[in-house]
Image (cartoon, helix red, strand yellow):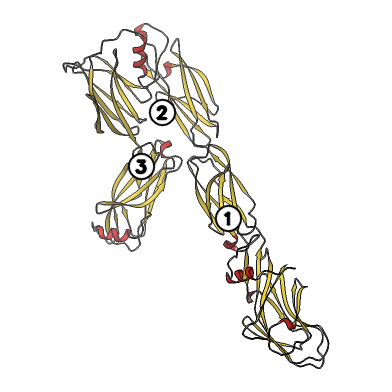
């Protein structure tokens, strides 16, 4: 057995129940609360205990038996720990030392002893002792070593204290890791950490993937949760590792969980080859290297058109008869919608295909037109060398819409910035001119989206004017192109807002009832995981009232419960889909509505417009 140094034991005692500095484990001090037993076995002595002070008296004896006269036992109160040392102070009140020894036992075995003469007689300066050990119980006792006559003897033992060392590592386990595919840059995880000494026995807790740290903190014992930022983690099956350090002990066993990440929609493409006799060969290719292809559907004419083919495989080639989908001379396109097993989807549009017309020469090969760059079909026609009118001096000023927010100037050309709603009609108009200001009559004009796909053709009127109605599904630069040599381009930048539909549970709400507003965001790919706010107006300021996050389909539900003691008032509300970093669409106020609170059908209470009542009802309930 070993004795601890005075400096180390004094530092540990000064810290009380807090962990002391140690090189191989933390030390905790326990005093009288660790006392397990006290005994005077043969009855020849007596003890008077006052708190942590033990006064032991052995009266004069003609013959004092050998053996234990007084003993206290202290036990470590925490499983997974050992007693590192026993410390106490002692003073002797009788003059002559007798044949009695002061002893320390470790788990019942003698670990140390000293003759009684070692105990000081100065009541003002009791002698301090510290005895090292490695045991579950520590005992301090007085033992008679000789059976002979003894005088009156009195001792006091003060503040017996054990220093306990934690030797058990903490434990940790995952309690909630997303089982489905994670399709965003964040993931919520939960775990539990525990230690025999509670939070004092636990150090830092860390979460990482492949050596990259995602979380590091020291929240202590109990259930913990964290929202992990996965922006730098690649897609695929990733091993999520939880590490929990012990405070002076070893670490908890490593806890691994599998996190399935897929933030990339499947790749998809459509290839068309024209065939004789109204035929077209369609090749569909769909792939997803992470979660795999779930299904795909090919439709004619548009996203809501008739289904041409569908499958759960990676694609196929099929020969189609255009007469089932288009009239002679009509131009259509095919739309492919593909989804992966993570729930992500992609929609692609084919090149335009024109069914042959007998009126212009009978059956002939199908004409394929499409994107192939920002100038699409007009660019390919110009590059082909076919005769085209000379447009070297034709010019345009700008295109116009009712949704134009501003213009930027490029020479004499104005480029409009257009705020449009996803898939909602936008009328785009403009004019092509000769240098003298006279309109360019009868010119063929194409309207192209940012990927170079045509959304219609028209002819200019006698004043050189043209007009298109389009339902935009892509943000970026759209172009009206007059077909000549060179092409004359009138650009406009369209920025899309989401299409948000909402449904209000009621415009009349009683105090204590909950107002619910449900809705959906289109396109689904942009609505998935999107933050939505319910705001109320206080004076000229809109303040947040409730928040919601859209699900995988872009659906959301906002809910707010009004106070049961609210008065009668009318509160202006609005649903806002705000701008967020990295979100490709514009923010939008989806709906505005006035909700009346405090109405009862039986009393006929009228609604006032007292905004102070509304302010009082909302006070202190701002979710921010």
Distance from label 3 to label 2 (Cα)? Answer: 27 Å
Dot label at residue 303 = 2
Q: Secondary structure at mark 3?
A: loop
**Quadrant in which the N terminus appears:** bottom right
Dot label at residue 192 = 1
Residues 206 and 282: in front is 206
Which badge, 3 or 1, comes first in the chain's sequence?
1
The residue labelled by disc 3 is: 579
Q: Secondary structure at mark 2?
A: loop
Number of other residues with Cα within 10 Å of mark 3, as a class: few under 14, some 14 to 19, many 20 or more: some
Q: Position of residue 425 (x, y in %)?
A: 30, 30
Task: Give the residue drawn at x 35%, y 13%.
Answer: 381
Distance from label 3 to label 1 (Cα)? Answer: 36 Å
Is 213 positioned to the left or the right of 554 in the image?
right
**Quadrant in which the C terminus appears:** bottom left
Residues 60 and 436: in front is 60
Q: Position of residue 220 (x, y in %)?
A: 55, 59
């Amino acid at each position: 057995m070993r004795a601890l140094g005075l400096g180390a034991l004094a530092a540990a005692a000064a810290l009380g129940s807090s962990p002391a500095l140690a090189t191989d484990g933390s030390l905790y001090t326990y005093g009288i609360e660790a006392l397990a037993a006290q005994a005077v076995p043969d009855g020849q002595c007596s003890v008077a205990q006052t708190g942590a002070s033990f006064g032991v008296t052995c009266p004069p004896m003609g013959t004092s038996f050998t053996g234990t006269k007084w003993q206290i036992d202290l036990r470590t109160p925490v499983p997974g720990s050992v007693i590192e040392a026993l410390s106490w102070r002692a003073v002797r009140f009788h003059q002559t030392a007798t044949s009695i020894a002061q002893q320390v036992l470790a788990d019942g075995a003698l670990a140390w002893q000293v003759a009684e003469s070692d105990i000081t007689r100065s009541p003002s300066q009791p002698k301090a002792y510290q005895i090292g050990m490695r045991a579950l119980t520590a005992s301090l006792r007085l033992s008679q070593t000789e059976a002979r006559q003894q005088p009156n003897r009195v001792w006091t033992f003060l503040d017996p204290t054990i220093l306990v060392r934690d030797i058990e590592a903490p434990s940790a386990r995952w309690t909630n890791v997303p089982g489905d595919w994670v399709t965003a840059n964040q993931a919520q995880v939960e775990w539990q950490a525990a230690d025999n000494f509670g939070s004092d026995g636990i150090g830092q807790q860390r979460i990482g993937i492949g050596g990259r740290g995602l979380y590091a903190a020291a929240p202590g014992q109990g259930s913990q949760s964290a929202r992990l930022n996965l922006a730098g983690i690649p897609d695929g099956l990733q091993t999520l590792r939880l590490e929990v350090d012990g405070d002076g002990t070893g670490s908890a066993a490593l806890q691994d969980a599998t996190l399935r990440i897929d933030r990339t929609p499947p790749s998809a493409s459509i290839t068309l080859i024209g065939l004789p006799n109204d035929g077209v060969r369609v090749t569909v290719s769909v792939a997803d290297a992470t979660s795999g292809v779930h299904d795909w559907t090919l439709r004619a004419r548009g996203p809501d058109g008739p289904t041409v083919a569908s499958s759960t495989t990676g694609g196929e080639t099929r020969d189609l008869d255009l007469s089932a989908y288009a009239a002679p001379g009509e131009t259509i396109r095919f739309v492919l919608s593909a989804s992966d097993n993570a729930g992500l989807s992609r929609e692609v549009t084919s090149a335009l295909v024109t069914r042959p017309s007998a009126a212009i020469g009978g059956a002939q090969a199908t004409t394929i037109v499409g994107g192939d760059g920002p100038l699409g079909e007009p660019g390919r026609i110009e590059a082909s060398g076919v005769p085209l009118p000379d447009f070297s001096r034709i010019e345009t000023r700008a295109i116009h819409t009712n949704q134009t927010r501003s213009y930027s100037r490029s020479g004499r050309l104005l480029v409009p910035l257009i705020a449009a709603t996803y898939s909602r009609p936008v009328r785009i108009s403009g004019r092509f001119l000769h240098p003298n200001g006279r309109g360019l009559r009868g010119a063929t004009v194409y309207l192209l989206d940012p990927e170079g796909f045509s959304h219609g053709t028209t002819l200019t009127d006698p004043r050189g004017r043209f007009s298109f109605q389009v339902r935009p599904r892509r943000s970026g630069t759209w172009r009206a192109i007059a077909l000549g040599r060179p092409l004359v381009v009138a650009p406009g930048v369209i920025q899309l807002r989401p299409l948000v539909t909402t449904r209000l549970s009621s415009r009349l709400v009683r105090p204590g009832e909950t107002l619910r507003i449900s809705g959906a965001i289109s396109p689904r790919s942009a609505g998935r995981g999107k933050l939505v706010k319910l705001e109320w107006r206080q004076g000229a300021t809109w303040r947040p009232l409730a928040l919601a996050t859209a699900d995988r389909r872009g659906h959301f539900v906002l809910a707010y419960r009004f106070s049961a003691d609210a008065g009668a008032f009318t509160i202006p509300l609005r649903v806002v889909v705000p701008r967020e970093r990295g979100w490709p669409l514009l923010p939008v106020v989806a709906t505005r509505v006035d909700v009346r609170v405090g109405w009862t059908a039986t009393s006929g209470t009228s609604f006032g417009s007292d905004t102070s009542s509304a302010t009082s009802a909302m006070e202190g309930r701002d979710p921010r």
